[in-house]
Amino acid sequence: MGEPYYITTAISYPNGRPHIGHAYEAIAADVIARFKKAEGFNVRFQTGTDEHGLKMAQKARDLGITPAALADEMSSYFKEMCDALNIGYDVFIRTTEPRHHAATQELWRRMEANGDLYLDRYEGWYSVRDEAYYDESELVAGEDGGKLSPQGTPVEWTVEESWFFRLSKYQDKLLELYATGDFVRPESRRNETQRFVEGGLRDLSVSRTSFDWGIKVPGSDNHVMYVWVDALTNYITGLGFPEADGDFGRFWPADVHLIGKDIVRFHTVYWPAFLMSAGLAVPKQVFGHGFLLNRGQKESKSLGNVTDPIGLAETFGVDTLRYFFLREVAFGQDGSWSAEAIVTRANAELANSFGNLAQRSLSMIFKNMDGEVKAGLEETEADAALFAAVAEGIAGLRSAFDDLDFSTGLESWMRAVFACNQYVDEQAPWALRKSDPARMEAVLMTLFRVVRDLAIAVRPVVPTAIDTLLDQMGQAADARHYAALADAEWLAALAASGYKVDKPQGVFPRLELPEEAAA
């Protein structure tokens, strides 16, 4: 097994069905997980649902069902989304699981034993929608004169007995954490977080008595834990905490928590402070990605523009959607999508560029070489230049992906694809068939080699299509990781096995704009 690598998404709040933002985060995390596996890491990938809190209790009451029944139903939709989008998680955690209650209560006991919890009275502004407390200075005025959170959600004045966490105690330690390494990324999120903490931290209310849908505070059964204490602990629950060995000992601290930019504060201020209090290591990195906008607008129920990600995948294809999201948006920034943009990008790059390169290369081998794979053919400077260009493009993809810069990585990969298509046009193997058949075979085997390498490189993004392509190229299922790119003997071994390319099937068909989108 390789070096451990632990990646998580935020757990989704299931008071509604999954939307495009959930899909975007899940896809990005899955690509990171697959990329790290291709690099030889022992990857652990966790996602799940955050099922407690006042919003869930209110939604269940409105529907006339229990919160548990609502959680069971809604959580299933998020699992369906992951399955539909080819999200290969290792653990799907639910915060209603008994193991999570046990883990969260143990974290609470450790914070209490460290002297960081005390009972007092809470009075302040609370946003039910955000499940967050806000200082008066953070509020903005709504159009009706009411007070709103920085996220634009309504707040209400709340008064109740509460347990408090000594967050103020950890201000200096948090600032030290931000100053060393890349705990918060991208830089813009780190700057925002640092400014917030530098402004001074107040102790945090971490329990509620006004509802009971949550994890009970040990020794105070009339209190349930603040939903963010509950939710954040999922990252260690799924590793078997509080058991110190096993998965927890192997994979903690997490290499990256991948989250939306709107919940950065909870992950970069509250979570590390809780962990420090409990005597546990903090995550190595929290990455706050941007929003995926629908034609420039954030999707919301009130605007009526919420998109079903499963429906979108059914329309355009799962791999197409995965590629578009990572290619179109500079990761960490907001980005926009539309049906026209998906079709344009997919046709230009997947269908016309790489898909066509693979299809015609295999077709020419099938037609002009009877599908026979040959090794040891004479190479020219043009061939060597192409191998170098492809190697450079793949190295660029790997370097950028390692930095979570997907759009730049795929741009590098596309430059290699363009170099291959230019090589085909310049070498014109169809003309060489009569004038120089030996050279034609060398050209086609050069193309066979570079298509295989480009396919392996991009496989974390579009795994289903690439596996279909690599099946047609005789590549073993266990030889599709990046170490295979360094195998200089693979073509000779394939040729020696007598493998023949059959009539190929295209893996990236051209898309048509749906009628409703074109209207």
Image (cartoon, rainbow, N blue to C red):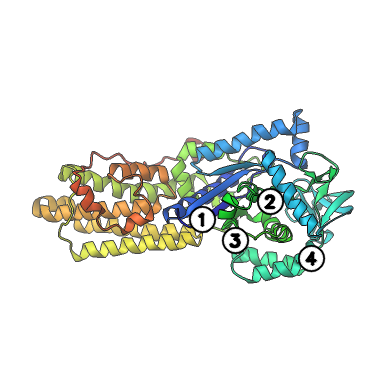
Q: Is residue 76 visible?
A: yes
Whole-Å distance between the Cαs marked 2 and 3? 14 Å
Mark 4 vs mark 1, foreground winner is 1
- Could you say which disc has been placed on residue 232 in the image? 2
Are the residues tagged 2 and 4 within 8 Å (C-beta)? no
Badge 2 or badge 1: first in the primary sequence? 1
Q: Secondary structure at mark 4?
A: helix
The residue indicated by pointer 3 is 285
Q: For mark 1, what is the residue?
A: 4
Q: Earlier in the sequence, mark 4 or mark 1?
A: 1
Within-10-Å neighbours for mark 2: few <14, some 14–19, many 20+: many
Type of the residue with mark 2: Leu
Which residue position holds label 4?
A: 169
Q: Amino acid at mark 1?
A: Pro
Give the percent coordinates (x, y) of residue 176: 68, 71
Instruction: Kindly give the residue lying farthest to the top in the view shown.
Output: 64
Q: Which numbered mark, 2 or 1, is in the foreground of this view?
A: 1
Quadrant in the picture for residue 47: top right
